[in-house]
Amino acid sequence: TADSATVYFMAARNGPVDLWSVRVRDGLLVKRAGDGRMRVLALTDGADGPVVWGVEPGTGGGRLVRVPVGDGHAGAPSVLIDALPSGVRAGSIAPGGRHAALVFVEAAEDVWTMPVTAAGAPSGEPRRLAEGGHPAISPDGEWVAYDTGADIRVRRLDGSNERVVVDGGRRASYPTWRDERRLFALRQSGLTPYLIEADLDTGAVTERLRLPEATTFPRVGPDGDTVIATLGEPLNRLGRGSLAARTFGEWPLFDGYAFAVWSPDGRRLALEKKVGPH
């Protein structure tokens, strides 16, 4: 939470995912949402406290539900979409929870948006935004970037002003925002991946750093220089590098981990442990 008083986390056992919280000052552990059936997609802050977005069993891929999980027990789920396509995974949540961008996976990937109020309540119908994956919402909450399997595109969350910012001449993926007008992404040149930077104003695309083969999920730190990424198969190593020094190599401290993301202040990493319990 914003006041650093409570940590929310998801716990899975044999498939279903439940949401729990632990209070930092005394370790009080509380189950907030989930009954062994719901799969948690995302957690956002609402005016009245945290809100969980999840999938419960139902027709097709199940039901998309919203559950308030403030102090005390979780509230009753509100069904937002009654029948999802098969296979749903989390995407990106806009700052302040104004929009939830989810990826619905069927034969191909589609990016959908779900507008919500500042309190986390739905304020409109979910709508298909584009064919693509790996959505990332801009820091100002106005744009979503996504990849199509070949190029990287941006468009406003209302669906207008679609633009190709990294062309499809070479496969590009994993867009992330540097600021409101610049993107980082991964682009392949043969077997060699490069971290690239795209400027939305000038249209310039610059290769910033060469990365090892089979690198995925690159993330540039808040300092604008430090790069971390997941290395190779079976995706259980991290690498670290510098844009300024144009260097990159394995990070032995985090052997057995993958898919790292930065905290906003650049002092912490959240990682997925790939060996043993996740």
Image (tube, helix red, strand yellow):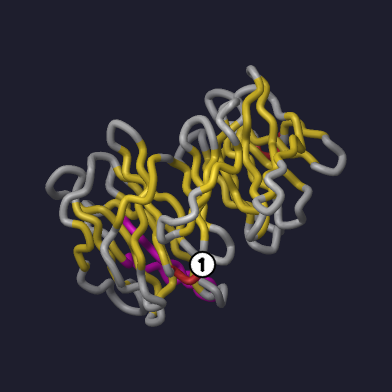
Give the residue type that dot 1 points to: Pro
Per the image, the residue denoted by label 1 is 95
Q: Residue furthest bottom?
A: 48
At x 53%, y 75%, the residue is 5
Q: Position of residue 232 (x, y in %)?
A: 60, 25
Q: What's drawn in magenta, residue-wise? A: 18-32
Q: Residue furthest right?
A: 245
At x 72%, y 36%, the residue is 251
Q: Position of residue 250 (x, y in %)?
A: 72, 31
Q: Position of residue 174 (x, y in %)?
A: 55, 40
> Within the magenta stretch, is there residue 202?
no
> Within the magenta stretch, is there residue 30?
yes
At x 57%, y 44%, the residue is 175
223 horizontally vs 72: left or right: right
Is residue 54 positioned above or below 85 on the image? below
For disc 1, the neighbor class at 10 Å (few under 14, some 14 to 19, many from 20) is: some
62 horizontally vs 117: left or right: left
Q: Position of residue 2 (x, y in %)?
A: 55, 74
Is residue 190 positioned above or below 141 on the image? above
Q: Nearer the viewer, residue 89 or 68?
A: 89
Report the predominant secondary structure element of the magenta stretch: strand
Q: Nearer the viewer, residue 268 or 228?
A: 228
**Circle 1 sits in a helix, a strand or a loop, which is it?**
helix
Is residue 248 positioned above or below 85 on the image? above
